[in-house]
Image (cartoon, grey):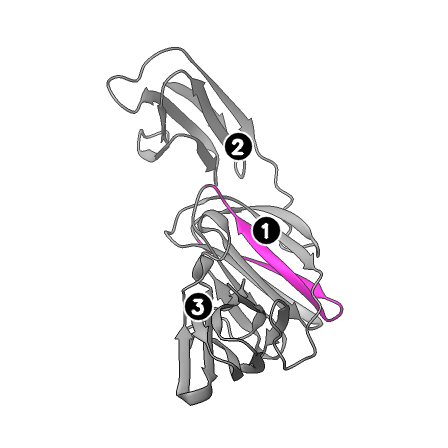
Amino acid sequence: MYRFSLEAGSIVEIEVDGSFESVLSLYDDEDALLMTDSTVRLRSEEGGDYAVVVSGDSSDSYGPFSISSKNIELNDTGVLVVPGTTSGWLQSEPRSYTFTVSENSAYQIDVVSADFDSVLVMEGPNGYYTENDDGGEDNNARMGDLLVPGEYTLTVGSYEGRQGLFDIKISSLDIQITESDTLSLGSEITGWMSAGSDSYSLEIQEEGEYQIDMRSLSLDSVLVIEGPDGFYAEDDDGGEDYNSRIIETLKPGSYQVTAHRHPESEAHSGVYSLYAGRR
């Protein structure tokens, strides 16, 4: 057991390095257990005395170890730099931030945390609203969209109600929206769905097996293909990361490829891509 004190508002990270699988248990000054993990991070709201206990995760876990702690400094002002990265701390309530977009542009926004499953909500001009839970890697939140000028609010939350450290990363996306309603084999179309659905024509010259993909970072994509002789195919999550993919044998003729968003999707608008090719 190791005892230490923290000032109000300070954030500490404690880690153990050793030859065995270790567990850290954190207690307050009344010996109430606050958390147990391989690495513990704590923000002391009012300051006080704490204790951390190092143990093995089983009766066979023992040996030498070193324990280290460090204070974490945040650049959290509540206002986000675009593009840029801001580090923050989530306590018991969701944390809100504002940022300003000066011109029409596409952005990707990530909330990355090793402490909790992040949830992200974004609100903006003209009733704009979108949210995401697991759009990024390792259950982190991610969204990408074309944003119009104005002030936006980002709200970061935890799916499990946990606390911890997180980073908000806003990146500019170099996206050129395709000004065409024709999907050509071997090429990719980039679209922006603002409402309803978008349809594209696809010409098949030779019978064969074809693959059509719809991908999006923010939309829950749904893909529909209609063609000759009553042909109809639809897919929701057949691709990677819950994206849509249709693999079918298509006969020569004219087809209509329609990009939808799932009716239960919280994101009403977003950037997506369509690709069609022969397998």
> Farthest residue toward the bottom?
229
> Looking at the image, which residue sits at the far front?
206
In the rendered structure, which amino acid carries the disc numbered 2?
Glu
What element does badge 1 sit on?
strand
Foreground mark, 3 or 1? 3
Q: Is residue 216 above or below residue 91?
A: below
Residue beneath the point at 47% across and 64% down:
243
Q: Earlier in the sequence, mark 2 or mark 3?
A: 2
Q: Position of residue 178 (x, y in %)?
A: 68, 74
In the rendered image, residue 34, in percent from the top left (x then y), is placed at 35, 36
User: Label 3 belongs to which residue?
Assistant: 247
Q: Which mark is residue 7?
A: 2
184 or 179, nearer to the observer:
184
- Does residue 148 appear anywhere in the picture? yes
SS majority, magenta: strand
Residue shown at 75% from the left, 68% from the top: 102
Mark earlier in primary sequence (2, 1): 2
Q: In the picture, residue 229 is in which quadrant?
A: bottom left
Q: Secondary structure at mark 3?
A: strand
Residue at the outermost top position: 64
